Image (tube, rainbow, N blue to C red):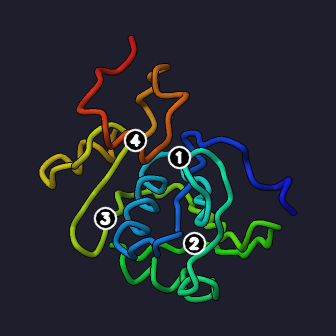
């Protein structure tokens, strides 16, 4: 099943290391990055360079991850989680749907496609223009990698 794991991150594929136990808040933040863009797959147990290092013992039973994500997102986000066993260790694949509305963490963090934070007074405008922001410069980055960008104007 190793062939089903992508080799690189992209706008719809995100890798997260779990060697030191990925904090639940970081896992929820990665999920909302994907949900607030195009959706996609989050692979927990893979380094940013694509090396499989496996899940932390606390995450070996992937059944609880979907419930934890729903409990730590507002509105609760329903994801599918499956375990992928590889020669280098178990990986959790979290399939994240594209959300029809902005999703935040239960702590109030909202991450989207081009701002680190989306302020509450801009939520309506952001949802109204969802999907109308084609910027070719963003095709080779990851959803969570976009948090590092301050702001980019739309392509014309």
* Residue wearing tag 1: 38
Disc 2 crowd rating (10 Å Cα; few below 14, some 14-19, many 20+) is some
Q: Earlier in the sequence, mark 4 or mark 2?
A: 2
Please give the name of the residue rendered at 39% of the width and 16% of the height, measured from the top-left corner. 155
Count the marks. 4
Mark nearest the camera among 4 and 2 is 2
* Residue wearing tag 3: 104
* Residue wearing tag 4: 130
Q: Position of residue 90 (x, y in %)?
A: 71, 74
Q: Earlier in the sequence, mark 3 or mark 1?
A: 1
Name the mark on residue 79. 2
Determine whether the residue tagged by mark 4 lies in a helix, strand or loop.
loop
Q: Position of residue 93 (x, y in %)?
A: 66, 66
Q: Is residue 124 left or right of residue 3?
A: left
Determine whether the residue tagged by mark 3 lies in a helix, strand or loop.
strand
Disc 1 crowd rating (10 Å Cα; few below 14, some 14-19, many 20+) is some
Determine whether the residue tagged by mark 2 lies in a helix, strand or loop.
loop
Asked whether disc 4 touches disc 1, contact meaning CB atoms under 8 Å apart, the reply is no
Asked whether disc 1 touches disc 2, contact meaning CB atoms under 8 Å apart, the reply is no
């Amino acid at each position: 099943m190793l062939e089903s794991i992508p080799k690189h991150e992209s706008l719809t594929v995100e890798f997260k290391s779990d060697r030191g136990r990925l904090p639940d808040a970081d896992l929820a933040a990665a999920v909302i990055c994907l949900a607030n863009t195009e959706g996609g797959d989050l692979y927990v147990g893979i380094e940013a360079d694509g090396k499989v290092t496996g899940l932390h013992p606390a995450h070996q039973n992937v059944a609880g991850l979907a419930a934890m994500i729903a409990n730590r997102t507002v509105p609760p986000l329903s994801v599918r989680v499956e375990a992928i066993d590889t020669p280098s260790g178990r990986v959790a694949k979290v399939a994240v749907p594209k959300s029809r509305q902005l999703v935040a963490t239960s702590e109030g963090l909202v991450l989207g496609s081009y701002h680190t934070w989306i302020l509450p007074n801009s939520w309506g405008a952001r949802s109204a223009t969802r999907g109308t922001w084609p910027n070719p410069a963003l095709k080779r980055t990851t959803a969570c990698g976009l948090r590092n960008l301050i702001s980019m104007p739309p392509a014309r």
